[in-house]
Image: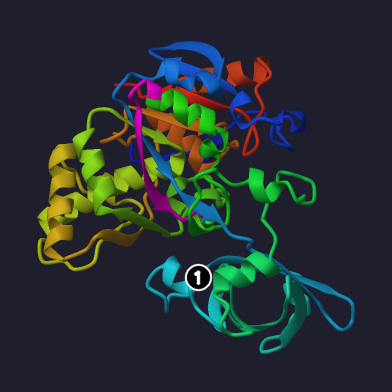
Amino acid sequence: MHPKDLSIYDFTYHLPDEKIASFPLPERDASKLLIYKEGIITEDIYRNIDAHLPSGSLLVFNNSKVIEARLLFQKSTGGVIEIFCLEPDNRYNDITTAMLQQGSVYWKCLIGGASKWKHGQVLEKKIIGGDKVIQLSARYVDKTTDSFLVELSWQPSELSFAELLHMAGAIPLPPYIKRKPESSDAERYQTIYAKQDGSVAAPTAGLHFSPTVFEKLKARSIDHTFLTLHVGAGTFKPVQRERMAEHEMHAEFIEVSKAALKQIIHSIDKIIAVGTTSLRTLESLYWLGVKTIRNPGSSQLMVNQWEPYESESKLSARDALLALLNWMEENKADRLLTKTQIIIAPGYKPRLARALITNFHQPQSTLLLLVAALIGDKWNEVYDYALQHNFRFLSYGDGCLLWISP
């Protein structure tokens, strides 16, 4: 069956509100860990994850950093407009370029209270940031199918957009966490290795990794590397139609260094993806490599949503990644900057990862489809076990180590 023909109603389960974690545990690595391997389920905690991974494994992490994407403006009439910064306008080639803009930037946003904000109207606010007084304004430029284009401008203009958000914005907790953000969320809704500004939601599998865990991994000769997928609307957009053919994944920015790609090639049979975003990036690298062979003269690469299902390839993972590395060298690129729209659903055959470390995901979500693609119908058994054994669900909850079924 082509994933287009899947019904999202076949990927649901009952998730009581009390199972959703509203706060993280005091210690990151104290979260429970469900291990699924060859049909057997066991339990541990993240602090001991090294004991469940083979020596010589390569863990692949997403080092994207959650930006303070929520901006609140109060109109002169007293009404509040919330601007949720989703992703940069298409005029910027990548998120890093957009985040470094000074003085003004164009951003695709969701708007809370949009009916109260007229086209062209400018909202203004003043922010005190340390010894700086920042004047911020927002102008409603245009309405697209599922977002608004907003021009944000500020003084002093030498501040970058990343710096402006850090001073003026708030961390955007997921809507299923039904509380206001607290000061502690600025640290806990962020991995300890977050580096590249750009995500509007955390790559949550990595929230459980502490310095202690990294030390224990190193002691067992388990290595790691980093790539970047900036989490946007695509990963968490609700599936609102029954048939997956009618669901569109938003393209998300990815960035992979040549050094990381070489490390992945070196450990090609020992890769463990930390998080669905890392897995989607790894699988995208495979298809980008295939493209460089099929279209050797191409100067730009991107993975479209259904491409892996409509473009059969028997190329090995090593050969695909070597081809991509060769393409980068020919194009004198030290890092790969592009977008992926890949959706991983039942019917997809993973090319790179042997296992996935991930949290528990919402019913009827594309992330649950991804889990089902890796372990088949056993996802039901895994989720039933987690519900019956007091695992905490979603972003601040517990997680699992899923060994991919052959």
Q: Quadrant of the N terminus?
A: top left
Whole-percent x, y for residue 369 in the image: 46, 37
Task: Identify which residue, 128 or 36, lies in the foreground.
Answer: 128
Please tell me whether residue 228 belongs to the stretch shown in magenta. yes
Residue plotted at (66% across, 15% down): 388
Residue plotted at (75% across, 33% down): 17
Amino acid type shown at disc 1: Met
Placement of 190 over or under 59, stated as above or below: below
Residue on which disc 1 sits = 99
Number of numbered discs present? 1
Residue plotted at (56% across, 82% down): 158
Residue positioned most to the right:
78
Whole-percent x, y for residue 402 in the image: 43, 24
Task: Identify which residue, 178 or 114, lies in the foreground.
Answer: 178
Q: Which residues are magenta?
A: 219-231
**Which quadrant of the view contains residue 161?**
bottom right
Residue positioned most to the front:
131
